[in-house]
């Protein structure tokens, strides 16, 4: 650029950090705003009880398994290379290649798993996957030192000692998410990205705009302390709070809560400490549970190896809970006059009974060591679900001069892309439809997309937290 353009990035989580760094490298003058004092808390999940950002978490799953969505598989592989390089250059283990065991609904491969393996074959990486029931795969796993993580789990109620089919993905693992956010924030700051944190000076209350014909133009942001910060472009990466700043996104996005529970292992318990370490225990995901108390299939559950502090985190995404509240007047899309927004931090410390039931059934089968152990903590983690689980990264068409940009819609799977997401997003911000990123067609503003992925349910759904029993 002949003249440095200024960009105000709203949000210092995964999407905001990645975008800010990439824009700076393109020559933009970048200022990042966030209401949380990350300069003080250093993204520590235990340092600030008011933080609801999904990015502030001990760990997040890394996977390259995406069924038929080959574009996300390839983006994940690109990101994995970046994580490995960062580990090597920084000396930190921000990415932990513990492997991921994808446990199937039965003793046979599921349809999604077959699609994933076909795409792995197409990209020439099938050898990184080990199907438990295939003798050749087991031999390769043994030769590569992965056989100990091809775990056997008996199917409850089976009379013939059947076990669940599973695929061990040696490319998978997890990121130490909060540590990674801190690393990227400090890296961006060292390169010249400016950060404004805090409940007053960093909390963006509104976008400063002016009318231009039948559209609007964003000229900057106004923070809670009343200060106006001018910018050529405003880029909002506000996670589950994005729709509250840009109501136009209510047609595309919905805030939903994923249920988390943890157990705590005492370091003195050497057997459990070793058993659930990343060296011995893989990430485990399961797409189908036994029936719950009401007779329904309770959906997707996962568990990660213990953290350095001994936390074993279990997540339930079989039901993505919503919190419908009255929407502001003039909101472009509402359901019965309401929209879903995150609950308060205090109310997000408990999880619905349906989630407790599903997690407990998962624990009984896959983590019997904790079958009768009380949870150490529970939490609703607020995600930003899109209509199709794909991100929304584009200029907002109701604003002129490409003055308002959104980078959001992580849908619970964005964290793994931290090292490289910004590169693709910055390409789109800078070049629009001339962007060379292969993600451009998938991330564009898409008002014509059908309302799916649960966003069609509305406030009358059992997913609405106001109608779900909270324990």
Image (cartoon, grey):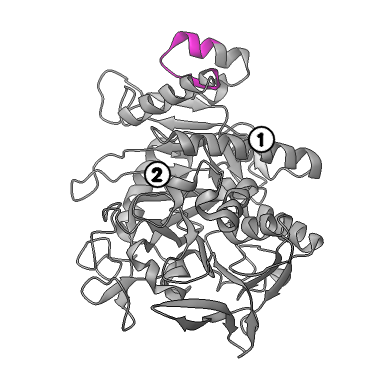
Report which residue position mark 2 lands on.
Answer: 301
Residue at 58% x, 37% y: name it: 173
Give how far across and how far down residue 410 sits, in percent.
47, 54
Looking at the picture, does residue 45 appear above or below residue 136? below
Q: Quadrant of the C terminus?
A: bottom left
Foreground residue, 247 or 327? 247
Give how far across and how far down residue 349 sits, in percent.
45, 67
Q: In the image as oriented, which residue stretches furthest toward the bottom?
A: 226
**Does the rendering let one see residue 161?**
yes
Foreground residue, 254 or 180? 254
Report which residue position mark 1 lands on.
Answer: 81
> Do tag 2 and tag 1 residues touch (Cβ < 8 Å)?
no
Q: Which residues are magenta?
A: 127-139
Give how far across and how far down residue 461 sits, in percent.
21, 62
Looking at the picture, does residue 175 appear above or below residue 148? below
Q: Secondary structure at mark 1?
A: helix
Q: In the picture, residue 139 is in which quadrant? A: top right
Number of other residues with Cα within 10 Å of mark 1, as a class: few under 14, some 14 to 19, many 20 or more: few
Sequence-earlier tag: 2 or 1: 1
- Look at discs 2 and 1 and give the one toward the viewer: 1
């Amino acid at each position: 650029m002949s003249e440095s353009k200024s960009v105000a990035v709203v949000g210092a989580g995964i999407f905001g950090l990645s975008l800010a760094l990439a824009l700076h490298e393109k020559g933009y003058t970048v200022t990042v705003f966030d209401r949380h004092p990350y300069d003080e808390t250093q993204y520590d999940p235990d340092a600030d009880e008011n933080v609801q950002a999904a990015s502030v978490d001990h760990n997040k799953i890394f996977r390259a398994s995406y069924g038929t969505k080959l574009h996300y598989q390839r983006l994940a592989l690109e990101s994995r290379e970046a994580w490995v390089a960062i580990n090597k250059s920084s000396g930190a283990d921000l990415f932990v290649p513990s492997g991921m065991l994808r446990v199937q609904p039965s003793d046979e491969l599921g349809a999604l798993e077959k699609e994933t393996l076909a795409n792995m074959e197409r990209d020439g990486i099938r050898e990184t996957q080990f199907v438990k029931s295939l003798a050749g795969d087991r031999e390769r796993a043994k030769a590569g030192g992965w056989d100990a993580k091809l775990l056997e789990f008996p199917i409850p109620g089976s009379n013939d000692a059947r076990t669940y089919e599973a695929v061990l993905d040696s490319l998978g693992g997890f990121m130490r998410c909060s540590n990674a956010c801190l690393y990227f924030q400090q890296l961006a700051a060292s390169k010249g990205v400016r950060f404004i944190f805090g409940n007053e000076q960093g909390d963006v209350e509104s976008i400063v705009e002016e009318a231009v014909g039948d559209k609007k133009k964003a000229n900057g942001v106004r923070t809670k302390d009343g200060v106006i910060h001018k910018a050529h472009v405003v880029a909002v990466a506000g996670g589950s709070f994005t729709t509250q700043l840009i109501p136009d996104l209510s047609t595309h996005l919905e805030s939903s809560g994923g249920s988390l529970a943890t157990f705590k292992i005492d370091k003195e318990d050497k057997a459990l400490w070793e058993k659930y370490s990343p060296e011995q225990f893989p990430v485990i995901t399961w797409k189908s549970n036994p029936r719950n108390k009401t007779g329904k299939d309770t959906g997707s559950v996962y568990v990660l190896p213990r953290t350095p502090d001994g936390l074993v985190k279990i997540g339930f995404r079989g039901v993505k809970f919503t919190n419908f509240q009255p929407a502001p007047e003039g909101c472009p899309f509402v359901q019965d006059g309401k929209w879903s927004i995150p609950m308060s931090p205090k109310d997000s410390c408990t999880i619905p009974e349906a989630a407790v039931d599903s997690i407990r059934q998962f624990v009984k089968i896959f983590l019997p060591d904790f079958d009768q152990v009380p949870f150490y903590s529970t939490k609703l983690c607020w995600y930003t679900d899109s209509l199709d689980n794909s991100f929304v990264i584009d200029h907002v068409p109701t604003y002129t001069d490409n003055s308002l940009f959104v980078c959001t819609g992580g849908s619970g799977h964005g964290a793994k892309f931290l090292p490289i997401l910004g590169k693709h997003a910055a390409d789109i911000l800078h070049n629009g439809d001339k962007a060379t990123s292969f993600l451009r067609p998938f991330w564009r503003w898409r008002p014509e997309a059908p309302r799916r992925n649960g966003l069609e349910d509305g406030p009358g759904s059992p997913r609405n937290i106001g109608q779900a029993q909270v324990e």
